[in-house]
Amino acid sequence: MARLEQFSSRWALLLATVGMAIGAGNIWRFPRLAGQYGGAFLIPWAIFLILWSIPLLMVEFSLGKETRKGPIGAFAALLGKKYTWMGAFVCICTMAIMFYYSVVTGWALKYFVAAAIGDLNGINHAGYWSAFTNSGYQPVFFHFLSLSLAAAIIYQGVAKGIERANRLLLPSLLVLLVVGAVRALTLPNAAQGLNYLFGFHGASLWDYRIWLEALSQSAWSTGAGWGLVLTYSVYMRKDEDVTLNSFITGFGNNSASLLAALAIIPAIFSLSGSLQEAEQALQAGNQGLSFIVIPQLFARLPGAQILTSVFFLALFFAALSSLIAMFELATRMFMDFGLARAKALAIVTALTALLGIPSAWSMDVFNNQDWVWGLGLIISGGFFAVAVIKHGVEKFRLRFLSPEYNDLRVGPWFTWIMRYLIPIEAMILLVWWFYREWDAQLWWNPFSVYSLGTCLFQWVLLILVLRLLNQKLYRWAMEG
Amino acid sequence: MLEFATIIFMVLILGVIWGGLFYFISRAYQREKK
């Protein structure tokens, strides 16, 4: 077996994990929610960082470092043959997201290029977005371009590829966000946006939706439960701290979210003609806000071309740094099965190119996949909790989280969160999302874009296949 | 015009999240220096 590569330093690993965590969701989802719900949203969002994200990040860091295998091998090593399929579910769920996330990265790249060459000047933005996404071949072309970039980075390996890419991407992203925030905060009426973003109304905390939206954001944004941190920690040094790294990854992700909100919310409120227009902008959905409303509003400023380019470059960098983590997870899976990096990567690239096409071609397919596998991630998070519970939560804490070389000791609070809170949070989230999108006529339909039926159909099919392959998966992952 | 309550809440949230990040990074830095 070839010797495992390693990150050259702790900072290189942290740049990679924070870069993985900061993705499109920090730029297009968090500011939208924070603006919609106001300051009260930020309290549960900060609480769930501790009550969902960081404990799961600790589990992922520990499993990757201890087992030196991707999610399938890690579950197999921790729990034995019987539960290997759970690790495979985590892997496939994140890969399914990778297929359409490459399309999102392509959209950001296309819009950056269009903004930089002046194609977005003086146009009807809604029409441009609709023409682009309905053209079919254009999103497919940019999907290919972005996955080729990710593949080229992963081909170089951990130190020369992932590490170097994140050394460039993450600091550049932060600089772009700071530039955007400074410009937004110096606009007239920027204070109105800040009053909205940080305006605290205690009564809003009684609104259960704020808590559930905050928990959803924590589940999706920090990358906890995706298997990505687990994959990166396969390459961490043996004597490295797990708990402190988890806190830095979680707080780093949330810090970037706040920076993105400071760049976007004041700009929306300043550039909108009225308060109603600003509120409508925040209701436009992730894609509507990023690809229609923001370029539309930025066009009202002098130097719009530069500011719009900065925004889409930041979105592209954020998406690419997450996409390469997903590529590494999938590549690691095939490497655990005994393939060399180049061969494993060739399979992953071909699969992503092929299986991303339907999402690039049709927004309905894209939205369906986002719905099914976005919720699938909550199950993945739940599986990590189940793995720790099966292993023994106290045993896990004492074995992995409190050794001599850990800088921060983890107390019994971890046991409580992992044993009770995370399974309950996962169940409540799933029930709430199904309730939210409930359609009395179509709830059962497996071919409806947003339905309980489509989720159950795809999840159950996947779980059945994985359970059938369980023995083989165990053998492939453990004997490679 | 920024409201007083906004300023207090902004300082609180940014203090917890950005301050927390700074604190954890400085702890990691101290450890790496050792």
Image (cartoon, rainbow, N blue to C red):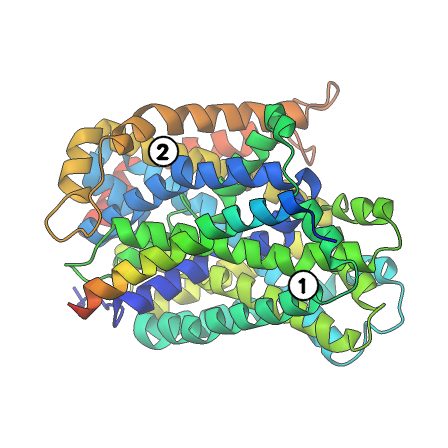
Give the letter of the chain under mark 1: A
Q: CB atoms at circles 2 and 1 under 8 Å apart? A: no
Asked if residue A35 is positioned above or below residue A165 in the image, the reply reads above
* Direction from residue A333 to residue A353 in the image, left or right: right
- What mark, if any, has residue A166 been given in the picture? none
- Please rate how many residues cluster around mark 1, counting C-alpha atoms within 10 Å: few if below 14, some from 14 to 19, many from 20: many
Q: Residue at x 66, y 72 (%)?
A: A310
Label 2 SS: helix
Asked if residue B19 is positioned above or below residue A173 in the image, the reply reads above
* Direction from residue A65 to residue A132 in the image, left or right: right
**Separation of residues labelled 2 and 1 (CA atoms):** 32 Å
* Direction from residue A164 to residue A404 in the image, left or right: left
- Amino acid at dot 1: Trp
Q: Residue at x 17, y 68 (%)?
A: A3
- Give percent across and percent down for residue A288: 76, 52
- Give percent across and percent down for residue A321: 48, 64
- Point out the residue furthest to the top here: A440
The residue at which mark 2 appears reads as: A383
Give the letter of the chain under mark 2: A
Camera-nearest residue between A395 and A136:
A395
* Direction from residue A215 to residue A39 in the image, left or right: right
Q: Residue at x 70, y 64 (%)?
A: A184
The part of the image, by quadrant, that contains residue A446 is top right
- Residue A68 visible from this viewpoint: yes
- Give percent across and percent down for residue A401: 19, 43
The part of the image, by quadrant, that contains residue A104 is bottom right
- Amino acid at dot 2: Phe
- Residue A148 visible from this viewpoint: no
Where does the C terminus of chain A fall, quadrant-wise?
A: bottom left
Camera-nearest residue between A283 and A327:
A283
The residue at which mark 1 appears reads as: A107
